[in-house]
Image (cartoon, helix red, strand yellow):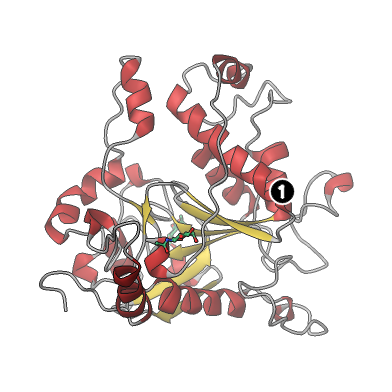
Amino acid sequence: AANVTGIDLTIPSQPAWSEDDINKFREGRDSDITVGSIYAWLGHNNALQWFLKSGLETALILEDDVDWDIQLRSLQVPLAANAARSMLSPSRYLSRFKVDPTHYWGDTSAWDLLYLGHCGDYFTAVDHGVGRGHQYKENLTSIPHKLFKDPSLPARRDLHPYTAALFDVFELPEQTRAFHRSKFPLCTFGYAVTRAAAEHLVNDLAPIAKLKTSKSKGSHAYDVSILKACRNGFDTPSPTPENNPHPHPDPKLRHKYASPGLRCWTLNSEIFHHMPGGSMIAQVEAQKNHFVGIPPVDRVGAEQVVQRGETSNIGCGFWRGAFRFDDGDKKRLAYLQEEVGRKGRCLKEGRE
Ligand SMILES: *[C@@H]1O[C@H](CO)[C@@H](O)[C@H](O)[C@H]1NC(C)=O
Ligand SMILES: *[C@@H]1O[C@H](CO)[C@@H](O)[C@H](O)[C@H]1NC(C)=O
């Protein structure tokens, strides 16, 4: 998928975690955190550590089972980044700062985490319900947000039922995405972080080391820690003015972290979503006679995924191998890169 789309991925090697790593992680936490969940947590932490060592300014962390649209690079990213820049330049607060055109995703001091791949930001927990009577148009219009057209977004009837219900309530026109401050983002399929945010996560917000205060038992899953961090960061404006109304509580850490949590933004709907299929975490759990069911959001989308032959909320993706090529087949890859990746032709039966 990356070759056809024309993007470059780095795959940091993951250590073989030992029983000892698992036990250490468990110390001082809720004992019912599952092994699968710990593996995922250690893996994300390892990727963040890799990023911090790399010297890079920002990183997009992708889980290894995500799908995306063939127009990710040619259309979706330019449109989403444009929306991000329009919201995330310090000039929105401080006129003496000029918009820095070298910051493709907006000034990196203005945000902590961009949620580009998630199983939904439905503004409240999904068990509270999604759609009319549960969310209101003002829930979106009262928070910082930017709407933009994206012709690669599936038609409303083809969006995940929850996404469609949310967008109906928000009265979003067809093929319109919203870039907004995160309210209740779930799952960590794809998220971008700055260096400060990665450090904050590794050291405080989602650490793997023994928790400093035993009264906080931590979260059951890595994505829940991030959700909490985003919620704790919601009151810190992004970008953040010098006179920050909601700074980090520790004066010694204020120069480092703008917020007690993270200043998160959600791209709704997402441009990365995990593919249907088996899960290594579920396999690990099954060996321990703990059977992991399909997560609730996936269950609601399952029938539509089969009927569309596409991953949830993805218009023309790579699931089911439509754009596969053999390893040495340079000719076919060149053809796919040009016609599918660059021109955005969905060369699948009955699709063009
Ligand atoms: C696909 O991309 C990877 C990473 O850039 C590269 O190493 C590999 O050679 C590419 N495959 C082909 C067939 O071009
Ligand atoms: C959504 O808006 C309603 C009506 O204004 C309000 O009662 C509710 O608390 C809001 N929910 C969230 C999650 O902001």
The answer to whether 212 is drawn above or below residue 40 in the figure is: above
Note whether residue 24 is visible. Answer: yes
Q: Residue at x 27, y 68 (%)?
A: 315
Q: Residue at x 78, y 62 (%)?
A: 244
Q: Quadrant of the N terminus?
A: bottom left
State the residue in front, 88 or 34: 34
Residue 238 coordinates in the image, percent (x, y): 66, 66
Task: Report which residue position mark 1 lands on.
Answer: 52
State the residue in front, 197 or 282: 282
Q: Which of the 4 image quarters holds residue 154? A: bottom left
Residue 73 coordinates in the image, percent (x, y): 45, 73
Q: Which of the 4 image quarters holds residue 22? A: top right
Q: Is residue 116 left or right of residue 21?
A: left
The answer to whether 43 is drawn above or below residue 158 in the figure is: above
The answer to whether 78 is drawn above or below residue 318 in the figure is: below
Residue 318 coordinates in the image, percent (x, y): 29, 60
The kind of secondary structure element at disc 1 is helix
Note whether residue 259 is visible. Answer: no
- Please tell me how many numbered marks the rendered image carries: 1
Q: Residue at x 48, y 23 (%)?
A: 33
